[in-house]
Amino acid sequence: MRNITVSDIVKATGGRLLLGDGSQEIEHISLDSRTMRGNDLFVPIIGERVDAHRFLCQAMQAGAAAVFTSRHKSRQEAEAAIEEQAGKSGEAAEAARKAAWIQVEDTKAALQAFGSFLRSRITIPLVGVTGSVGKTTTREMVAAALSAGFTVYKTPGNSNSQVGVPITLSEIPEEAGIGVIELGMSEPGEMTRIAGIARVDCAVMTNIGVSHIEQLGSQENILKEKLHIQDGMREDGCLFLNGDDPLLSKVTPEGGRRACFYGMGENCDFRGENLHLENGYPVFTAVHGGESAQVRLKVMGSHMVSNALAALAVAANYGIPMEKAAKALESFEGYKGRQQIFEHKGIRVIDDSYNASPVSMKAGLEVLRAAGEGRRKVAVLGDMKELGPEAPRFHREIGAYIAGHPIDCVVLLGELSCEIGKGIKEKAAGCGITYCGSLDEVKEWLDENIKEGDCILFKGSNSMGLSKAVAYLKEK
């Protein structure tokens, strides 16, 4: 973010400058009062449990050059807050009086308004990515394919929310030739807000599953919400749709925009053929019209083929030959917490701990079977969250899947995961099942049972904390 002043932010948000210099330049946006990089705008979000206005002076002492505030309506109230949080004198008080205090009605809404302003200054194409499962992996693969012809900027980490997308837009560097922006949602109306900020040129939709069905009620509602990614999209934009998904395969884009289907089916514009595994890794032929290219992936699981085809379709849309894009895809070797495979003291570990849904859980188990060939196969599984009243059934279905695709040992963490055990037992499968009531119990089980030569999968919703079990295993 360059050549943006406090006055620009005040104008973009409809705010008022209570303290500070309007000519001060701002280079970054931060939501964390402890992490400033220099000339930051600190945005205090009011959460269910914590109001970050408590940390305004802490942020300014750490280097924030400006802050939003919806709790202070006048210069006098801002000065009173400085005295309360930082005292009458000292470095903290001095930094707080020097910084710009921008009064807004709602800090989150102001951040979104500022994000929309920043979007109006961006001239490079932006590719949006959404879906129930595989957004981040698809984002990374699209970026890899596009790197064959562009300098690519992509969403960092998981900054795909109402507050993450404005920050993502603010960090696009001048040298970038194209951007790949992940758009997530978990509640009604959220995609409309995010899409209105990002205003992507085209978009990829990976699938429509049951993630967040607790908030949205049905897969049809999830589809309807995700299709709002078209809000603000260019009229000549393209919607890249998974043609193998029962709901997406029937979608007609709005406003005369183009549809491009990808997948294994005959209905797909970008189609995968001759799929097979070599040492567990997918190899297939990508076909589009009269063009074809062999694709060799360095990530396991046949579900990765769909993500790769989406990446090839987007690359072709921006003029990159399929063979060149396919070669660039070989550079992708996975993303942290998403089916990353590594060896540790003779143990093969599949770290898929970032999140979980029924579709991704089955995909992770498929990778375990491929990566664990000739080894003892162990699955450490946690609850899948936000699945609504049908959550027990979805977990039992995972158990039935395991029974039909046997592995050696299952370790279960969480109340819902117990239903996985029920699903296994209903099918009278012979794999060993261990129930753990806490992460400490999981770690104890690892200490006592994991041995050289094993292959172990960690998979569960992020809130289950299985990434900590992976870290524990690495530290040992």
Image (cartoon, grey):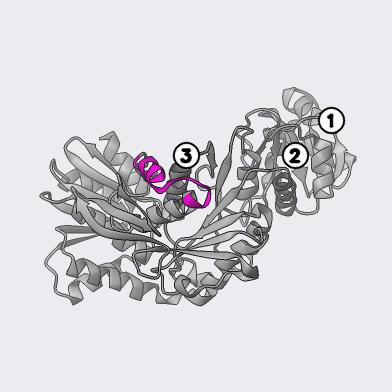
Residue at 24% from the left image edge and 47% from the top image edge: 444
Which is more N-terminal, label 1 or label 2? 1
Q: Are marks 2 and 1 in contact (CB under 8 Å)?
A: no
Quadrant of residue 426 in the image? bottom left
Measure how far apart labels 2 and 3 are at the Cα level: 36 Å
Image quadrant occupied by the N terminus: top right
Which is more N-terminal, label 1 or label 3? 1
Residue 296 appears left or right of 237 = left
Question: Which residue in the protein does label 3 denote?
Answer: 147
Query: Which three-letter amino acid code belongs to the residue tagged 3?
Result: Ser
Question: Could you say whether the residue bearing mark 1 is in a helix, strand or loop?
Answer: loop
Question: Could you say whether the residue bearing mark 3 is in a helix, strand or loop?
Answer: loop
Image quadrant occupied by the C terminus: top left
Measure how far apart labels 3 and 1 are at the Cα level: 37 Å
- Of residues 165 and 301, the one drawn nearer to the viewer in this rendering: 301
Quadrant of residue 31 in the image? top right
First to last magenta residue range: 316-330
Judged from this view, the residue extending furthest toward the front is: 290
Question: Which residue in the protein does label 2 denote?
Answer: 67
- Of residues 199 and 190, the one drawn nearer to the viewer in this rendering: 199
Residue 244 appears left or right of 102 = left
Question: Could you say whether the residue bearing mark 2 is in a helix, strand or loop?
Answer: strand
Judged from this view, the residue extending furthest toward the top is: 90
Residue at 71% from the left image edge and 29% from the top image edge: 39
Which label sits on residue 23? 1
Q: What secondary structure prevails in the magenta region?
A: helix
Measure how far apart labels 2 and 1 are at the Cα level: 14 Å
- Residue 413 visible to the viewer: no
Residue 126 appears left or right of 130 = right
Query: Which three-letter amino acid code belongs to the residue tagged 2?
Result: Val
How many C-alpha atoms fall within 10 Å of the one at disc 3: few (<14), some, or many (≥20)? many
